[in-house]
Image (cartoon, rainbow, N blue to C red):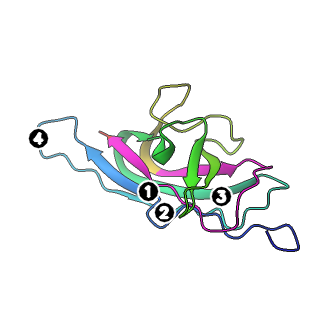
Amino acid sequence: MNDRGIYSRSALSAAAFFALLACATLGRAQCLVSATTLDFGTYVPLGATTGLGTIEVGCLSLVKIDAGGAGSFTPRSMKSPINVALDYNLYVDGAFVQIWGDGTSGTVTNSGPGILTVYGKIPAGQGVDPGVYSDTVIITVEF
């Protein structure tokens, strides 16, 4: 922490989203999927930090996001290079109520086609060391 009480950059890494396509038919169905990195920028522990990402899905589909490296949806957790955890979560709504997951453990899924916004939030009050924090989550698109 520096003299202004600001921790250095806490962000999901460039590898924040990977898209896996699961085809529900035996035919040659295709679905184009792309995603942007959700970058939280600088985390200031006095207040929650939020960020936005997007998933673009080109077909009628069910879109799930896994729990990431934490193995749990409540909370998900980013890690520093020395394995310090910074809790966060991903939501389908800007009110940060519905956790985007796989439909289990109180989470919800989303659906395409279209550009889907991923709302991220790091809760306030986490006393973590300065540094870069990251997590990788897997997006599953079922069509």
**Is label 2 in contact with label 1 (beta carbons under 8 Å)?**
yes
Question: Which numbered marker is on residue 36?
Answer: 2
Q: Nearer the viewer, mark 4 or mark 3?
A: 3
Q: Mark 4 or mark 2: which comes first in sequence?
A: 4
Q: Residue 126 location in percent, x, y? A: 75, 51
Kind of residue sitting beneath label 3: Gly
Q: Which secondary structure lies at badge 2?
A: loop
Query: Nearest the camera: 103 or 7?
Result: 7
Q: Residue 66 location in percent, x, y? A: 44, 41
Q: Which residues are magenta?
A: 115-141
* Quarter containing the N terminus: bottom right
Query: Nearest the camera: 91 or 86?
Result: 86
**Is label 3 in contact with label 1 (beta carbons under 8 Å)?**
no
**Is label 1 in contact with label 4 (beta carbons under 8 Å)?**
no
- Residue 127 on the magenta span: yes
Q: How far apart are labels 4 and 2 at the CA level?
A: 29 Å
Q: How far apart are labels 1 and 4 at the CA level?
A: 27 Å
Q: Which residue is mark 3?
A: 51
Q: Which residue is mark 4?
A: 27
- Residue 25 on the magenta span: no
